[in-house]
Amino acid sequence: MHHLLTFIQTNMFTRQEYNIIKRRLEEPRKFIQVVMGPRQVGKSTVVKQVLKEIAIPHLLFLADDIPASNRAWISDCWEQARVLLRVQKASEVVLVIDEIQKIQGWSEIVKKEWDMDSYQDVSVKVLLLGSSRVLLEKGLADSMAGRYEEIRMGHWSYAEMHDAFGWSLDQYVFYGGYPGSATLIEDEDRWRDYVQSAIVDATINKDILQNTVITKPALLKQTFELASAYSGEIVSLTKMLGQLQDAKNTTTLSGYLNLLEQAGLVGGLQKYSNDMARKRTSIPKYQVFNNALKTVFVNKDFSQAVLDRKLWGRIFESAVGSHLMNEAFRHRLSLYYWRDGNDEVDFILQKKSQVIAIEVKSNDEQDTHGLHVFQDKFHPRLSVIVGRSGIPAEAFLSMNLKELF
């Protein structure tokens, strides 16, 4: 394990977004580049890797500890970049601001400074990073139309965890895809502490509670824990309410789930239908974005879970769902499940009018009746079985699912 840790620490492993970011920073100044994705997936690391490799002068600022009301700080960063441009007599400079969504009203200042440079032909190329998708997207929608491009980073795939850390498929299915946790799995208590504090608590406290008025923070945390434990299962909001203390109605619960989804923790998939209203009123299927968020609540360690076939089947399906959630986020695809009576299809992936049905088979179970009913009813572009009787899990969890369309 030690040599693998050294491998990561020397930043030799590069995610696929590295090439996209490098290419866009090296082309003529056109758009602000916005790198967004959940915590602990390596956004800052990949940007630093790119900055080391490009020949353009650059400055990197972190908004984490700046008072939220200090909008002038953004203008100060920008002015430093202009000074660097003049002092170095460079033709262009890269300005990187990390966690920019922490500054209230950030997008108005960014728009003002960007437009001023555009007007005066000052080549400050801008790269913004943020982990709170909801705050980033709100700011982008409010002020930045036509001025930016998004680069979306999801959680690490099985292929990435295998290549970087030598993980087996079973390890990935159980421990999920957080690179920061990879060296901790020999001590499961340490691994669980990391997932709880560095990811769950940090995301809920910093990305949600600091920026949204939540009347019952404890209820939000409980909602997360229940939804994550149910990942891969279809459970009504009413049933969830019955298990939550202090919860009064499904509207609050639905709102909390929406916030947890936008923070890249756990979402509620809607039932696939040709009717939008039916999609919105369906019972959700809970799904974590990273399987560590489900298994951290499992009362068995890795070696025990693998031997519990029923439990492992649920964990395995949730791991496939995590991959689908991330691919849907990265490539702007829609993800659903489908059920009609006793017939069910685990996941439905949609791009515009094209539909792909995906059924997960974790063990010897071969029944695909639900898939055939769905095919007859909706005529999907493709039907995919993941597992023993179809595409091997290793291959599916390594795929760029955009290529299926």
Image (spheres, grey):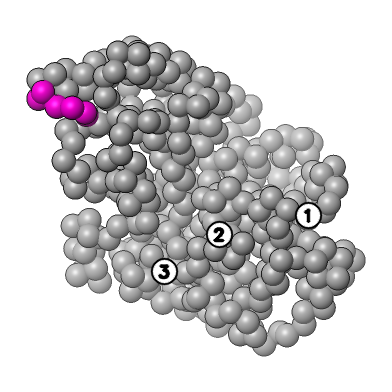
Could you tell which of marks 3 and 2 lies nearer the N-terminus?
A: 3
Range covered by the magenta-colored residues? 88-93
Q: Earlier in the sequence, mark 1 or mark 2?
A: 1
Examine the image and state in which quarter residue 213 appears: top right
Which residue has dot 3 on it?
159
Judging by the rendered image, the residue that carries numbered circle 1 is 271
- Specify whether residue 98 is painted magenta: no
Work out whether mark 3 precedes mark 1 in sequence or the reverse, and give the earlier one.
3
The residue sitting at 37% across, 56% down in the picture is 16
Quarter of the image for the C terminus: give it. bottom right
Q: Quadrant of the rendered structure where residue 298 is?
A: bottom right
Q: Name the residue under label 2.
A: 402
**Amino acid type at mark 1:** Lys
Give left or right: position of 203 versus 329: left
Q: In this view, does 119 lie to the left or right of 273?
A: left
Answer yes or no: is residue 72 visible. yes
